[in-house]
Image (cartoon, rainbow, N blue to C red):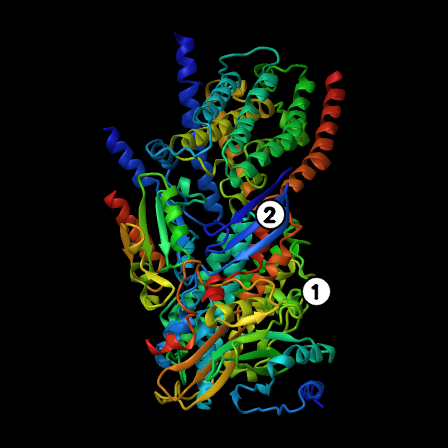
Amino acid sequence: MTVTDTLLTALATVLPEAVPDRDSIAGGETVLDCPPEHLLDAFRALTESGSTVHLSAITALPADSGTLLLYHLWIDSGLTLCVHCPRNEAPSLTPLLPAASWYEREAHDMLGIRFIGHPNLEPLLLAAEWSGPPPLARQEKTDA
Amino acid sequence: MIDRIVRWARKKSPWILHYNSGGCNGCDIELLDALTPRYDVERLGILKEASPRHADILICTGPVTLKSRIPLLRIYEQIPEPKWVVALGSCACSGSVFADSYHVLGGVEQTLPVSMYVPGCPCRPEAIISALADLLERI
Amino acid sequence: MPEITLPVGPQHPLIKEPISILLDLQGEYVTSARVEIGYVHRGLEQLLQRRSYTQGVAVVERICGICSHAHTTAYCQAVELLLGLEIPDRAQAIRALLCELERLHSHLLWLGVLAEAIGFTTIFMYAWREREQILDVMEMISGGRIAHGANVIGGVREDLSPDQVEATEDRLTKLQQQLSVFTDLVDRDKSFHQRTHGIGLLPLELVYAYGVVGPMARASGATLDVRRAAPYGAYRHLEVPAAISSEADVWARAWTRVQEMSHSIALCKEIIRHLPEGDLALRVPRRIAPAKAVSRVEAPRGELLYYVESDGGEMPARVHVRTPTLPTLLVMEKMLPGLQTGDIAAVVAGADLCMACADR
Amino acid sequence: MHTLAQILVFPGAVYLFGLGMFLAWVDRKVIAVFQGRVGPPFYQPLADVIKLLAKEDITTEGADVRLTAALPIVSLACILTAGLMVPVGNHTIVSFEGDLVVALFLLSMPTLGLFLAGLIVPSVYNVLGGSRALLQYLNYEVPLLLGLAAPAAFAHTWQMSTLMQLQNGYRWHVVAMPLGFLVATLGIIGKLERLPLDAPHAKAEIGAGPLTEYSGRKLALWRLVTWVQTVVCINLMVAVYTGGADQVWANWGFPVYAIKIAVYMAGLSLVGVLYARLRVDQVAELSWRTLVPLGLAQLLVALLIGAY
């Protein structure tokens, strides 16, 4: 049993419906769907499984309704948790894993996602002078 | 007579201050490279100073971003007269590939009066030296 | 003594790029630190959505002037994954060669900056003089000292002639001899030790908690190196040695990087000695069917991640870049408190910050 | 008339300024050569000063205009006075028993001036630099004094010209008391705030230290202070430890003295090339743990030998 399989078993207790998908993202990533309310539990399950969880990045994407958050992890191989947030809101991972802090702030900058429980959700990259909508939010794309 | 002496001194002792107002690092390291053994601009009397109060020439690299406009202006104001501004690299000259970004205001010229443009992406140390020498000729 | 706030940046002689670190001081000691970035934010991710895939290569090259080739490699690799392409062996080898050369030049540059921070200008000058050798080789291969434009989607643009192979090997041998200056410095020089030992400690738990990557993490005992963990391109056929220290201080970071430099020289030689024959690049379509790809590359500063999504058009629907400096900056707020003001420079320079990468 | 000319021209003000600039160039050139560079042309320091004099002079808001202007002038005056007492070749303008102590006192004024100059400007870098200058003063002054006390105790005199003449015929103190010479040299490096003991104006840490907010004329004056201070300190070391212009060489006194000065200056530059900057606490440790005991030991030995 590889490390990934162990992890998937650990995750299965938290995310019973999730089916690991190895094709939707190219580059050797295993993709798992995860509802926002189970995100923190999933991370807890991963940390408790004994391996070191390296959070590589959080990619935020505008989706048809709300936003899509991709948590790119590295635990001996690539693992991406795919979180669909219908209301542009997500639970913050920062109290659990400090590494998420700036990635969440950046996603807040770029797409205006509110991370509930983030200690300091100030703009990270955008200047104080910036007054427009979040630059990567959907309406921005059409006028380009 | 005094005028001529002063002008000579200014030509021979330009102290530079470097500010990256939003560039990619390429021109910055080429500027630093100009200080190192192969190019050694100290032979022209050029010193890289730490404080804007000591500098004569402000070298800007990169386009001016929304956030660095105010620091850039503050630094420029702190430099005592007479002073010159050099826009180093294509980005500082015109904004280059970043020109139409939402967070970029464009080249340095839109914020400060520029005396010398050095194109190149990034500009080579030879270009930097030649541009500084040209600027000194005109002082 | 009253508490004062020492601002480091946005303009500061230590860091060539704008960043603002606000330090609260109690006498000569730092009590807390706040890092503020965004001065170099150029909105690249949005810019990339408005450029075709081919144009995008030129744009990502300008994210950072030091690790430009790592950025284009990661981007091209991601787009190739979208297309399901496997690029020719020769192209992979040339990509890897430039990656290793870039690592050499970045590490030498870093060593110089660290030396300048601790007042050792001579080493700064020596390191940058040797760095010129690498720049010469890269210029010979690609025509550019800093921005190479060597990568295209589907392969590389520049070939290596037998003459160039020979010249490269020559330069690398020379550099290997010169490298002993820096190994001696790190191993033996007393004043270098005095200024770098035991400062800027970064325990392994913090490395994991903050997701720190690259030589910075390896100096604290972490093992993650994308070239070894998930070999890509030519690294699949190469043996990459590990340089891991457990001292976790600035000295360890210097040691790790000096080790990596000699490994890089060996890797470069290995690559050019067994340069496979074949095409340089494949033809790629302008439009890419909807797909998603994640590509990880070991840049000089650590794991560089690109996420690219296509929607069937000529331009990417979303490009997300996670650069290795970001977690390092975040952990700075934890590393600086407790230091003396005299050590701030060594720790900040020793972290190998690249603001252009971090801000994009 | 003759004395006035001596004070103003040689070996007084003009000479000290001229040599100061020349040595500043030697310093930069030696460093450049050791780093594999070409280095600046010989007129560089002169051009720097003229340019600074002609530049706009900004006084930071909140700083006392008169005090900021007075400090460099007072410092310069103190050093020039010290310069009159220190033998130049075999010329001395003022000489009296105990002039070594007075010269040392006058030489410590610029450091205090620098401390005040940093403190009166409301900028963090200046204040930090200023307080570091004071710390530096407390650290180097004792080793320097001990290092110079050894030859004085050995020769039973605190008069520099006598000390110098006693060494005629190659009986140089540096040979008899190498430890004392070493301690005093490190004291000088600390006093002149040169690498590796230049924490008060460590560029990478606190900008230009106490002078960060100074520009134009005031900066030019502070540069001159440093340069003249360098000359006076080197003159002093050459006189006390290597016998200045040796009488054995009667007609060649001046060239011999010039060579000694150049060698000493190059030595100081070389130390800066070879070592990394020490932290403030490391300077204190070096000074009190190493230099002071060494200096005391040398003084004891000198006293014992001198007694016979």
Is residue C270 placed above or below C209 in the rendered structure?
Answer: below
Residue C334: quadrant of the picture: bottom right
The residue carrying pointer 2 sits among few (fewer than 14), some (14 to 19) or many (20 or more) residues within 10 Å by Cα, namely: some
Is residue C52 placed above or below C204 in the rendered structure?
Answer: below
Q: Which residue is drawn at 48% across and 30% down?
A: D226
From the image, tell me which residue sits under label 1.
Answer: C246
Q: Residue at x 23, y 45 (%)?
A: B138
Considering every residue shown, the one lying at the far front of the view is A87
Q: Which amino acid does label 2 sit on?
A: Asp
Q: Quadrant of the N terminus of chain C?
A: top right
In-front residue for pair C22/D109 = C22
From the image, tell me which residue sits under label 2.
Answer: C24
Q: In whole angstroms, how far apart are the C-alphas of marks 1 and 2?
A: 29 Å
Q: Left of D220 or right of it: where is D54?
A: left
Provide the chain ID for the residue under circle 2.
C
Considering every residue shown, the one lying at the far top of the view is D1
Residue D290 spot, x, y in % from top left = 71, 36
Tags 1 and 2 in contact by the CB under 8 Å rule? Answer: no
Q: What residue type is labelled 1?
A: Ser
Residue D49: quadrant of the picture: top left
Q: Which residue is drawn at 67% across and 65% down?
A: C206
Is residue D220 placed above or below D308 in the rendered structure?
Answer: below
* Residue C158 visible in the displayed image: yes
Q: Left of D182 or right of it: where is D64?
A: left
